[in-house]
Amino acid sequence: MKFIFKWLLSAVALLTVAYLYGGVVVTSFGSALLAAAVLGALNTVLRPVLVLLTLPVTVITLGLFLFVINALMFWASAALLSGLDVRGFGAALLGSLIYSVLQLAIDFVLERLFPD
């Protein structure tokens, strides 16, 4: 049940990013659901590999390069889907920052609702 709520709230978070920032466009709630699933899959599979491969750069930049990796994941999910449009790397960076803050809030709320 927690997984379904997280997926639905992640889609709402994507719609919120699109509402707050014009550089990210989501065409519908269905597109947001698919984009949330693809973004979650990319973050689960590809992000750890990229973090490991870019570890020296991440250490040199004191972790700031992780923002670039988050933006790349956000941008890649938009490239894979037709219902999510990100207008450039800067838009991906700002959109991924807003999305990350919303994901923190979602995780906080879900931990309160569904304690393990």
Image (cartoon, helix red, strand yellow):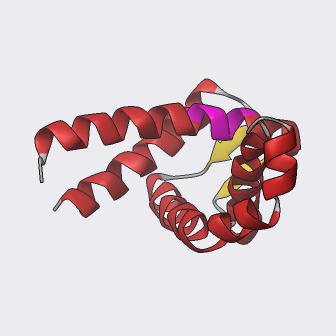
Quadrant, the N terminus: bottom left
Between 64 and 107, the residue placed more toward the observer is 64
Q: Is residue 32 visible?
A: yes
Farthest top residue in view: 20
Look at the image and tell me in which quarter the C terminus lies. bottom left
Whole-percent x, y for residue 78 in the image: 71, 59
Residue 87 in sight from this viewpoint? no
- Residue plotted at (70% across, 58% down): 73
Q: Position of residue 86 (x, y in %)?
A: 76, 48
- Residue 88 falls in which quadrant of the image? top right
Vertical position of residue 10 compared to residue 7: above or below: above
Q: Is residue 97 magenta?
A: yes
Query: Magenta region's main secondary structure?
Result: helix
Count of residue discs: 0
Q: Is residue 12 left or right of residue 79?
A: left
Depth check: give the residue in front, 35 or 115.
115
| Residue sitting at x 57%, y 30% | 19
Residue 14 on the magenta segment: no
Percent of width and height locating residue 87: 83, 44
Q: Is residue 44 above or below residue 56?
A: below
Q: Residue at x 23, y 43 (%)?
A: 110
Q: Which residue: 57% across, 61% down? A: 39
- The answer to whether residue 58 is left or right of residue 4 is right
Q: Is residue 48 above or below residue 92?
A: below
Residue extent of the magenta highlight: 94-98
> As rendered, which of 58 and 97 lies closer to the eye?
58
Left or right of 29? Residue 74 is right
